[in-house]
Amino acid sequence: MADHIDGPRSIGDPSIDLTDLFAFASPENAGRTVIAADVFPSAGASAMFSNVVNHSIVVRRVTVAGLGDTAAFKSGDEEFRFTCRFDVLEPATNGAQPIQRGTFTCPDGQVLPVVVNDEKGATTPDGAFRVFAGLRSDPFILAWLLESLKPFPNLLQHDNVLSIVVEFDTARVLDPSKGSLFGVIAETTPLPSPSSLVGHEPPRYDWIGKPEQTNMRLNNAAMAGTEDLRDLWNQQTPFAIDEDVRPLFHKRLIDSLTNWDMRDGRADWTPAALIASANVFLDDFLLFDVSKPITDTSFLEIEKSTLNGLAYRTGGGRTVDANVIDILVTWTVNRDRESLRGGATSATQPGGNTFPYLAPPSAQLQTVADSVDLLAPPDRVWALIGQFGGTWHPLIAKIKLTGAGLGQLRTIETIDGKQIIERLEAIDDTRRFYRYGGITGIPAADYTGTLTAKPKGTGTTVEWRVQYLADGQPDIIVKSIVSTLLKTGLGSLKSRFDTTK
Amino acid sequence: MSATLDVLMAPSPATAGDIAVINLESTRRHAWSRFWHTPQRPGLAEYIIEQEGLALAFLGDIGALDRLGFLAAQLAEMEGDSLRTSLVQAQVASATHRFADAGRYLAQAQRRGAPAATVNRLSMTIDQACGTRLDLVLAARRQAAAQTRRLEDQVPLGALLADLREFEEADEVYRRALRGYQDVSPFAMAWVCFQLGVLWGELASERQWARAEQWYRQAVAYLPSYVKARVHLAEIYVADDRPRDAETLLIPVLSSADPEVCWRLADVMASQGKLADAEAQMQAARSGFERLLARHLLAFADHGAEFYSGSGNDRRRALELARINVANRPTLRAFEQAHAIACRAGDVDTASELSVAATRRWGGAAFFRFSPLAEYRLQSAENGVASCGQRAN
């Protein structure tokens, strides 16, 4: 029997793939620190955590060990480890989603049961720790095509991730009197198991410190033909990169940072500064200082000031709304000579001021599509439906056009007296399609419709596709409105063309 | 390697199968949603191909093939002259076993500047599936497997070695894949276990059903909704006179669109004397196969041939489909299937013709000596006449 023998190019569990790490002071209470780690890029609406890994956030105290071209940060040995693990699913009744529970272990050994997607989270009896785990809107803004450094709309728009958000009493847990600068990483590691005879488990599956260490710096897409070091990097021990391979990573970072520096054709970094920058990035942990303000723009300020030979002024860290890619791109390309901006400056949803701070999951775009096969040839069909202002639809009483060409508006008055306004976004009479966006009249956001007439034999297939986010009405209501619109319109074409032929 | 040693391979930790399936399905739907919003997003179409491939291979979601076809058509409409479109079209054509089309799209991609590594990877897939240039494919597979040690490179090597009847080495390669895997996807682990089940339950010259059963059971343990693994395991249960076990195994995946489930359940019902139920399942299987063959003839020709030569009970249709499969992907396995069906149908001329063609193609190859086709030729030569005799397998 035939099998699809080649299989996928890579077959890992995306739910253990760490995407981001955040560290900031709680907007609700400046005396509490929030650290959040995200896994599972582009997670679907029902995403769940893997039940066979530990999800850990590890904090260590850090000191500044050098300034300027000798900039360095030294991490201490004391470790504050927060670990979350999740169980298998519990079946739910009445067709509801299954429930996933987990266990959160605090650095002081307290253990908290958590329920995935419970927005209130769980709090230790002493109030020192609070934790949330579940699906949230991805706050990352990736608005560049990094290989060519071209601005682009946010590539992660409407995406969600699985988040683990930990909030704790800063003074009680971290004791800043011993030093207020910290480095944090997150990692996914195997659960301890008595034996695993099949293979040898890796010490960890993935880890993250500063954003984009692997995808922008170690595996710079603009450096064709270089060996992919990401797997080797992920096998390293955070805070203790193997001395044997450290030179390999250091060399790659220098090459990559040099490439980034020259992306605008101008060298803003001296060779010595590039080496220092590579050293700082090689010690890959997210720096934050709990005694200074952490803002949406303070990300990387500690590293930047230190490399510039100055004392840092902010708490660095990374807030939910920080546009870290623009900050990194600007710093690595022109050393802050000129601000570089991607094609979007905000994520799908901004972060919130209350626990758990990351916004609720972004609604998934809904699609309603329908089609009809007609006996009439495409040109004849398109002559009728290809007019943006055409009143062929039986539910439309009249249409008023405002403007001309792309961007023109049509104000539709329906036979039951409602008004819908739509804007023409694209039209191609040769390929017989047009696309329009909704302005008002349908309780939906991001409303886009596409109408196409394609040849089918000697006849035509008319396809109508609408995509939207329900807004102000339940999904099912909006879907019913849109489905009726499509079905009635396409049905009318059937009776018009197939009976008049 | 003995079955006892197989047992000693304790399962490696993997994310629970139900979690992985929920994640796959919701991610797949989300990927399509993103595609409609930003179809030009880099890597998205390629990601959808992988997600749909998993849904097809593991969940028996045969609608994945339609969705893949739709994806390729949409890209062709939006950016028909792009390199990306050619590569996606090649992958989709390959997934639906339209290998000639896949080759054409790949050549087009090459003209449009596709990276050599990408072209070689797809080209190897097509060659392996069609049984062409196997010596080159084997060398390249060995090299890739040795270099990366990744499961994704070991499994195709194991599959090729099995095709070349190097069963022990294939077994070792699959085990190496299991040992070396450093992630927790149950899809990966179940995939290798399933391959090991097929190796010892279907491909090996001397079938070892106990050994195959153990691997299929392990595959199902990793991924309870693994339709193919359940179907193959059920076949073993039926052969071992355990129809109730087979029924228990098949019922939970009856809702999948894979007609093999209905087919095997029909056999199970029949073996228990539940003839009305068996007939209902057989009807569902027959209409299911015909529906698939109408939409994706080349992808399911060999499956259809197997069905109709078995309890589907239409040997003419079986032979017709088997020959279509041979024409599309002239592998030794395809020849053997067609030959066996011709023998069962008493079509001596076709059996001889297939035997001659196979001998012409692989007569000098070591692996051909162990093929039933070689033995058939030998017997024919000795007897002076063609005879299907005992050769049907």
Image (cartoon, helix red, strand yellow):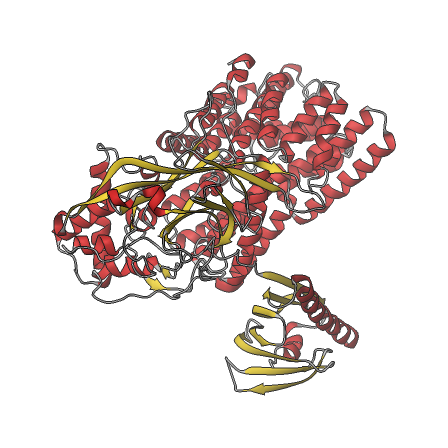
Residue at 35 percent across and 43 percent down: it is A172
Image quarter for residue A201?
top left
Which x, y percent locates residue B373?
Answer: 61, 23
Q: Position of residue A491 (x, y in %)?
A: 74, 70
Q: Is residue B105 visible?
A: no
One can see residue A473 in this view: yes
**Quadrant showing the N terminus of chain A:** top right
Which quadrant, please, contains the C terminus of chain A? bottom right
Q: Residue at x 30, y 51 (%)?
A: A290
- Residue B299 location, quadrant: top right
Q: Position of residue A412 (x, y in %)?
A: 64, 82
Q: What is the tally of numbered marks visible in this picture?
A: 0
Residue A174 x %, y %: 32, 43
Tell whether A252 sits left or right of B6. Answer: left
Residue B7 or residue A37, whichever sits in front? A37
The residue depicted at 62 percent of the width and 66 percent of the height is: A465
Q: Residue at the front extreme?
A: A126
A211 and B207: which one is in front?
A211
